[in-house]
Amino acid sequence: MITQSTRRSFLTQSGLGFGSLALSTMLLKDGVAREQAWRPPTGEPHFPAKAKSVIWLFMNGGVSQMESFDPKPMLTKYGGKTISETPFADVQNPDKLAIERLVVPDGNGNQRNTLYPLQVGYRKHGESGIEISDWFPHIARNVDKLAIVRSMWTTDSNHGAQTQFHSGRHMNDGEFPTLGAWVHYGLGSLNDNLPQFVSLGSREYWNKRDGFYLGPAHDAVPLRVDPKNPLDFSQSARPVTERSRAIGQHLLTKLNRIREGEYPNDPALEARIASYELAFKMQKSIPDVVDFADETEETKSLYGMDHEHSKPFGMTLLAARRLVERGVRFVQIQHGAGGAGRWDAHSGLMNNHQTNALQVDQPIGGLLEDLDRRGLLEETLVIFASEFGRTPGSQSSNGRDHHIFGFSVWMAGGGIKGGIAHGATDEIGFHAVENRHYVTDIHATILHQLGLESRKLEIPGRKRLDIDHGKVIHDIIA
Amino acid sequence: MLSLIPHIGTKAEDSLYLQSIKPVLKARCYACHGGLKQESDLRLDTADSIFDAGIIDSGALLQRITSTDLDARMPPEGEPLEPSQIAAIKKWIDSGSPKPVNEVGDTDPSTHWAFQPVTRPHLPKSKRDNPIDALLDIRRSAAGITPLGQADKLTLIRRLYLDLVGMPPSIDELNALMTNSSNHWYTDTIEKLLNDPRHGERWGRHWMDIWRYSDWWGLGAQLRFSQKHIWHWRDWIIESLNDDLPYDEMVRQMLAADELYPNDLDKLRGSGYLARNWQLFNRNHWMEDVVEHVGKGFLGLTFNCAKCHDHKFDPIAQTDYYNFRAFFEPYHVRTDVLPGVRDVAVNGLPRPFDGLPDAKTFLFTRGNEKTPDKSIDITPGVPDLLGLPLPEIQAVSLPDNAWQPERRKWIFDAHLQAAEDAVSTAESNLKAATQKLDKAEALLLKFTNTPDQTPPEKEADEYSLEENFEQLEPKRWKIFGGEWEHNPGRLDQKMDGATRSVLRLLDTPPADFEATLRLTINGGSMWRSVGIEFDSTQVDPSQDITGDHSTQNVYMSGYAREPKVHAAFNKGGTWQYPRGAMGPIQFELGKEYVLKVQVRDTLINAYLDDELIVSWYTQLARRPGSIQISTFDVLPTLKAFTLRALPENLELVKPENNPIADATSMAGAKAALATAKQNHSLMALDLEIAKAAYSSVKARGKALQSLWNNEDEELVTTTRNTAIRAQQQTAVLASRRLLMQVESKLASGAGKKEELEKQLADAKTDLESALKAKESPIPDDANVESFVGAVWTPTRFYNSSKDDEKVEFHAISTGRRTALAKWITDKKNPLTARVAVNHIWLRHMGEPLVKTVFDFGRRGNNPAQPELLDWLAAEFMDSGWSMRHLHRLIVTSNAYQTTSSLRDSDSQQNVDSENALWWRRPPIRVESQVVRDSILSLSGTLDLTMGGPPVEPGMQAASTRRSVYFFHSNNSRNLFLETFDEALVKECYMRDQSIKPQQALAISNSQLVNDAAPKIAELLSKETKDNPTFIKDAFAVVLGISVTPDEIIECLSALEQWERLPEGTSGTARSQLIWVLLNHNDFVTIR
């Protein structure tokens, strides 16, 4: 049996941890590091973990909190009035707007003064009776599994906030590791045949790297839900028979091993050999993850794969389940490629959100149910988020602008309470007013459920601000 | 309980203080109460000083760290100390605050090693030839350690090649060297490689990492970061290295060539360094980037830490940060017009200039740009820490040509040449139009003289479609690929990049048809193609077309170098672009065009705005299929689409020389004549316009010349008036042309009628006012429109949807950056040379001398070999900052030539496991560029063309140019290179050397490697017949390894197995073996 610690040492040697190995060697030469006896993470949680894996559902562009998870009937009541004409004029008090930073004035992210009525109805669902908009019936069916945080805020109102949601810092602040990279760095994998941090779906607007100063070994590996070509370079560009390749692989290992005689104690050579073994295994195991031949029709339709509109995202989420089932730590999923993100409803919000919800709602509902019935939800954290919310006021007559002062995120599984709504915005959904949470509070909560303490993951010489660490949202933890 | 004098601690007590308390104090307290600062006269950096301060006895220490009053609590910033930390301090106090023996306190920053002047250490007496070895010996002998032996010849050859030119030797070069028994082979090889142009490319890439080279990027086609044509700076780096331009001079040119050499375009390329930092939206981020990376890159100082508060480790106050920023506050970026290219979109030189000489620098309170402290104007200045004053800042008077670049001779020459070319083009167009007209007249005459046999105009098929995209009807259209966004009246495709997407019409179209598409092209990375396709088979056309599938495509392309309309087709996956099926067009982004395609049998006519561009018989047989609109690498807006069956009597123009000779009917001949007449008038007018424009350019040139030469007032006025009249005349003719075009559009019904009528009215007004202007007296203060010599790169700091007010070029430059550049490159500056030699050492030797390559401050690492670092820095400066001199010194040292094998090195490992004494050479995982370049070089396919615009992402797969020439930005990175830790464009002072499974996949499976392996095998087989020799040569050439008997046995056995496979031959077996060697660890390693 492979124990945790030998598994970890395998990983360190196998090159998946080589970046950190090299880093530790480097830093150990450093006086500061020596005094503080800094060591890279061992791969063990800092305290007992409640969750093993994370599925991170990120809606590119900004989901309207008012039309999804945070009903605001006052908007309908005062629709068409300017905010100053309503009893809520104080939301525009400059002091309350001061959290907004001036990063990139890109013409969006302005306060829109004329209130825009709710574009969708709300109904109570589940035993908790929490209201969810009618555009998300499948998620709503699972409301008793969700902890909805209705009191999120962030500081930057352009789409560079997409990196802010993942790393805690805006795109223009520099480049910082994203949450998935931290998790990967702190815990490593549960399965040695698969990449441990996977990205599905397009995020062309923001950067493609994740590890940054943690090193490229902690970047997400982009996968495609296509068994023929699931991973870059996973197929030989020239046809080659299996037998011929096997002879070559065998010879390669032999030759590298012979060189160990010439170059004993060379960690890079060891890591190279291990990385080839892993690559050859991955080449076999990855197509299997995205090949759904062994899934029942019932499961496929649970994910909405029998409808054209929800099929692509359904396939993505089914692949996500298969990944966490096989022990992948962090599956980062992006929905809504193109421009700054497809949820970016500056105009035509109704059409935009309805279309997008049709694409994601059933797959997400199906994912929650499928994880649940397989007993995976207990150890899998699911997060639904976007970089910010949208303005209570209208833009271009039928849209909403970017909004950072209050928006919603929900989490489910992995030891999170179900059927609760935590925090609140004011009556028109403008400011988070109760139990306010910055985006990194979500990171802190996820790390906490995984048994990690972000301060213990810090790297000497890479100062993190307090706000980067965030605060655990204890109220939503079961 | 408390003792009055701290006692000397026991070992256990020491360890409490040293391990649990001192690190906490260092991390949380030293910044204000240590060597750097002594706030409230308090130092906490030794047990003694804590005791002496009396804060233990008074209880103040515990009180302050446990206080809940935020104003009183220490440390004031961040979280309070952790309970366990407080408990440890308490325990220490309770045990009598024992102090360790000989405790060393925090150093005084003024004594920090890196801030001391570089003094050349005395070389020890030594038998060593190379001072590097002599200096390394000092500490080695003290530690009783001997370096390992020299690596073998093959390893050294590979080392030199990969290190100095970035690829292994060719087979011939290797053979020649292996048989070269001269004593000088090593130094001869070094000289040869240092003089090889590939050397500049190899080392240029290193400096491009440090100086953060990046091609432009943004959102789609919008430039947001860096600059177009920044590759001039890359070429300057490479050329400068090949010329051994002194490092200090390179730094000066990068920071201030616009002030030092204002008219020297070659040197101005160097200042691309500053143009690269440009940002569209936020000036502060731009300035932050500059301050941070000038500091880190040239000085090893982390100024960026002092943006919000005083530096915690180094004596850099927050004001110092803003003093440093003030050097750059005035500068902006422009693109100079280069000889021979008028359009800066095509080419131009990006460079800085002081456009905002009066811009003020304010300190941002707590670093927040929203809270500038406007009470103090911050002036340029350098921190005192180096004890080196800034030279006086002297404003620079720029020569006229520099700040009025329109005066540069080639600007006028280029305009005149272009005008001349336009006249000859117009002349030949008119000639062709006249011939056509003559023939059309003759033809009509023929029909007039014979009875008209034209059949009555037949009602066309019922089929007719007018789509205005008010709705996007799913029953009518189906989308494949791309990112389409529909709004009433417009359909946009918003995904940029070299992918196809298609909007397919679901109706069954008529076989012979006429389709029009009204559109604008708003952007697109390169090809910008929108096409009307027909006969398309029903596959998902955004994917590859394969098998029996086919399509025909008549498209317009806004490709900047060659805008065109082109009729192409695809059969079974291969696109054919017949050259004759193409016609050039004038193209502008954002302008509305109507593309019209008429097809009868295999004859295609394509019009753009009613101008016939293509007439062509397609070579692909017609077949029933769909009609669809396709896009490739383009951001278009589709506004209207019409489709109708081609009226039977409509004559298409045939591609023969005599396009109308074959008209078979009277109506056809009449139509042809009408077209020919219209065309003729237009061409005649075009010639008039071209001639007028030519005169106008000449007159403008003359007028500007007399103005610039300060000729007498009368002459200035006369030439000015001539020029203005000439310009007005051109404007009149241009208005006429526009009017003529709108009239003909109206007549033919292309486009929306109301819009056209409005255009007609506008055109008439324009013409009237143009005529009026020509008749009106010229006002005294009228100016001749100047030529454009440089274009300011517009920013959008204040409003993202429109450009900021133009920043003007000024006659005076502030001289601030010149002063800074002089200060940085002053030999008395203790940091500049040290930082540079450390970077150079790192890249030769695999590890730097100072680990924190961008931080030589007190938080950084101390050099393990301070004498060596200082000697190299002194030698570097004394050699006239010659990098080549330094390269020679390092690569001829024994340290460089030492083996990297740890075999038989137990004694050394026991004494110095970290190799701080350089007793071995660390192996290096080569950079991404070396991996790719080596593969191409070994296969004999590497294209050694130097310089020029970068290879665009879409062209990279097919390109065999060196990787340094690949387009490289935050948005566009080559996937293969990326896998091997490609440089980050925002910060890359040291490459990662990761080892990950994706690298294994990339080398195993990529096209690059799989194409190269058989070629390498073939090259190696040329002279070698037997397998053992092939194996030996392959190891030597691909890996730089002398093969061992074990390896030969394994390879022979594998070769045999491959040959025995059903598909096996000696050739395939050998290429499989090469494939294995390319995947070998040593292929990506410098041993």
Image (cartoon, rainbow, N blue to C red):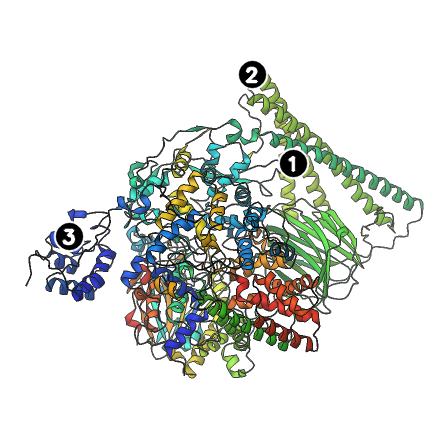
Picture coordinates of residue B649, whole percent (x, y): 83, 54
Q: Can residue A331 be seen in this view?
A: yes
Residue B107 or B819: which is nearer the viewer? Answer: B107
Q: Which of marks 3 and 1 is in front?
A: 3
Give amino acid for label 2: Glu
Which class describes the residues within 10 Å of circle 3: few (<14), some (14-19), or many (20+)?
some
Q: Nearer the viewer, mark 1 or mark 2?
A: 2
Does dot 2 land on a helix, a strand or a loop? helix
Q: Residue at x 43, y 83 (%)?
A: A374
Does dot 1 land on a helix, a strand or a loop? helix
Q: Residue furthest front?
A: B127
Q: Do the residues labelled 3 and 1 touch (CB within 8 Å)?
A: no
Give amino acid for label 3: Ser
Picture coordinates of residue B831, whole percent (x, y): 37, 43
Give amino acid for label 1: Lys
Which class describes the residues within 10 Å of circle 2: few (<14), some (14-19), or many (20+)?
few
Does dot 3 land on a helix, a strand or a loop? helix
Instruction: For mark 1, name the chain.
Output: B
Q: Name the residue under label 1.
A: B764
Q: Name the residue under label 3.
A: B49
Which is more N-terminal, label 1 or label 3?
Answer: 3
Q: Which residue lies furthest to the right in this view?
A: B450
Residue B835 or A457: which is nearer the viewer? Answer: B835
Residue B390 or B162: which is nearer the viewer? Answer: B162
Q: Name the residue under label 2.
A: B713
